Each structure stands twice: as structure tokens, then as C-alpha cells.
Image: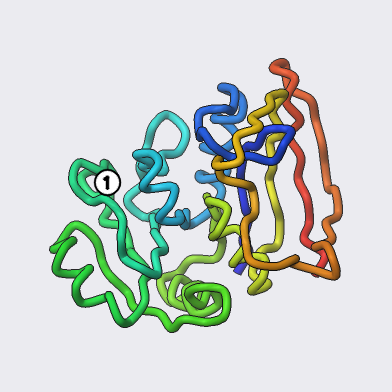
Amino acid sequence: MHVIMVAAMTLCGRISPASMGSPEDRCLLEQLRAETDCSLLGAASLRAADPEMRGPDGILPDDRLRAIISGSGKFPIKNKKIFCQGPVPVVFTSKKVALDLALRLKRRAEVVSVEEVTHGLSLPAILRNMSERGVESVLLEGGGVLNYAALAQGVVNEISLTITPKLSGDQTAASLVSGPQPLGNPFESLELLSCRRTEYDELICRYKVSS
């Protein structure tokens, strides 16, 4: 399974608001969706916005999996487009809330229970489930807690990161990676694969996760 983490961030490492990227960054996200078999979204991103995970030309392919991960099962459902349009998404959650969440969602999503590990739900277990569905590549669409868990559990192969020429300074805004302790000793090492400047003064970088 090949997993790509994608994000746009400020120079101070914040990834919200989600609309900070340029049209070129948006096109990159849509192209990455077209090149992968599945998008996995954290519940915090669903609370903050109304994502549908559309590809180029606004298309929602019937054979592309859209998935959400939420250990608590606490996220908005009413009027969220992902539950109203396109193929039915899959929601991965903990065993203790799976039944109640399935009752809340009714037939608007498929609910799959997953065991809990040190850093949230087991992402290797989720990827195995996806593999059984024919998925070979996953686009990890954040936010910071999911990004941290994926790196801590060692499932990320690459990071596609757009660095925007902006500053936030808001200590309450979401970070690219957010967790309880350092990912490495003291850092997670990355290898730069490519970097280019856009007409909007962004830097679009591609990294390989070394570990």
C-alpha cells in the first residue's frame, strides 16, 4: 500500500483555514486524488469544512473510495455533502461506538470498527481493509492528529506539502502534525524528492519518509 500525506501550510506550520492554498495547489490536490484509489479524512477536517474529495473537473468517480476516520464517532452528519452526494463513504471508528454511529448514519455511510492502538485507531488495520477492497494507494487528507498518528504508526511513504507565503500566528489553528511526543529522536527524517515555485510564490515540495 502506498500512502501519500497531502497538505498546504503556512510558514509557521498551520494547516487551517483549508482555503489558504492557491488555485494551483487546488489542482494539485485534485490530481493526486485522480492518481490514488482512496482519500482518508480525519474527523476534525470534517468538523471544520464540508469536503467531498472531488477530483479534476469536479468529478466523483464511482470506483474511488472516500473514507473518514474517527475514534469517537463525534462528527457532524446533517447537510454534509459527503453523506449526500457521490458513492457511499466508509467510516472507520472504534468498536465501542460503531453500533451507535451506524444507527446515526443509517445508510449514508458504511461503518467499520477497528481496534485502538497507542496513537488512535490502527491505521495498518484500516489499510488492510482497504486492500481487501482493491485499494493500492491512499491519499491522506489530514488534519494534524491523523497526520501524527499515520507517521507514528509508520504507514506514510510520501508527503506532498505546499508551503504558502503566509503567516498565521494563531496558536489555536491546526498544525501539520500534532501529537503528544516527538515522532523521532527528536525528529522524523524526510528526504526531499522535488520542489518547485508556483506563480503564487508557493513552494510545492514532495518528501519521502525515511523511516
Residue 24 position in % (x across, y down): 61, 24
Q: Is residue 157 left or right of 50 when viewed as pictured?
A: right
Q: Quadrant of residue 174?
A: top right
Q: Is residue 31 left or right of 181 when viewed as pictured?
A: left
Height in image: 56 above or below 122?
A: above
Residue plotted at (15% across, 62% down): 107
Mark 1 residue element: loop
Quarter of the image where the N terminus is located: bottom right
- In the foreground, 4 or 120: 120
- In the foreground, 34 or 84: 84
Looking at the picture, which amino acid does disc 1 mark?
A: Gly
Residue 151 position in % (x across, y down): 67, 65
The residue pinned by badge 1 equals: 86
Quarter of the image where the C terminus is located: bottom right
Residue plotted at (40% across, 41% down): 48
Residue plotted at (63% across, 39% down): 14
- In the foreground, 73 or 68: 73
Residue furthest out toward the top: 199
Height in image: 208 above or below 93?
A: above
Q: Residues within 10 Å of mark 1 (few under 14, many from 20)?
A: some
Residue 161 position in % (x across, y down): 69, 42
Residue 3 position in % (x across, y down): 61, 61
- In the foreground, 68 or 149: 149
Residue plotted at (45% across, 38% down): 55
